[in-house]
Amino acid sequence: MELAYIEGKTFDKIDFKEKPLTKGEYENCHFQNCDLSNCDLSNYMFTDCEFLDCNLSLANLPMTAFRDIQFKDCKMLGLRFDNCDEFGLSFSFENCTLNHSSFFKVKIIKTTFKDVQLQEVDFTEADLTSSVFDNCDLTGATFDNTIIEKADFSTSYGYSIDPEINRIKKAKFSIHGIAGLLEKYDLKIS
């Protein structure tokens, strides 16, 4: 079966649970106010696309390709980015809710997370080198054997990162976030 190739199209206010998105490759497309929650997006390819005010919660993502994607004002609960196609995987997130998602072993260097809720997100063994976490809520996020070298957490909060089991060389933190680096020692910092 040949996959569709769709370029430069805008999808506005479409509920893809009712009418599934055509399986294929989407390039330079815009998705606005669309509902893709619980949709099977396995083996779809998105390149240079933008998702604005969309719901992608619990979408199925095995071998989904996200290449140079912008997510803005999106609800994206419980997504398994660790199942995506690794080749060219790159995206940015602004004002999104990504709670309970997984980036397990995902290499996403220089990724920007701006005003994003990342509660209970799994970053175990991920490579987040030079990524920026600008005003992000990382409460309950898991960092275990994670590479966060040169990453910027200086305006983020709620994180607990153990410097002994993560690579954090030249990462940036604010003085207010120091407690999140020392949490395992049960210190009282004031």
Image (cartoon, grey):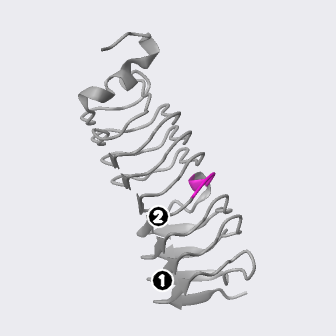
Q: For residue 50, what is the image quadrant?
A: bottom left
Q: Which residues are magenta?
A: 76-81
Type of amino acid under label 1: Cys
Q: Residue at x 50, y 49 (%)?
A: 106
Judged by depth in the image, the label closer to the viewer, 2 or 1, is 2
Q: Residue at x 48, y 83 (%)?
A: 29
Q: Within 10 angstroms of label 1, few (less than 14), some, or many (20 or more) residues?
A: some
Does the stretch in magenta take in 79?
yes
- How many marks the image carries: the answer is 2
Q: Where in the figure is residue 104, as x and y percent of width and height? A: 55, 44
On the rendered structure, is 140 left or right of 94? right
Q: Where in the figure is residue 86, as x and y percent of width and height? A: 52, 59
When the figure is inspected, residue 61 is found, relative to residue 21, above or below; the finding is above
On the rendered structure, is 142 left or right of 150? right
Does the stretch in magenta take in 128?
no
Residue on which the image places disc 2? 73
Residue on which the image places disc 1? 29
Q: Earlier in the sequence, mark 2 or mark 1?
A: 1
In this view, which residue lies farthest toward the right? 18
Q: Within 10 angstroms of label 2, few (less than 14), some, or many (20 or more) residues?
A: some
Which of the numbered marks, if any, corresponds to residue 129? none
Please identify the dominant SS of the magenta region: loop
Type of amino acid under label 2: Asp
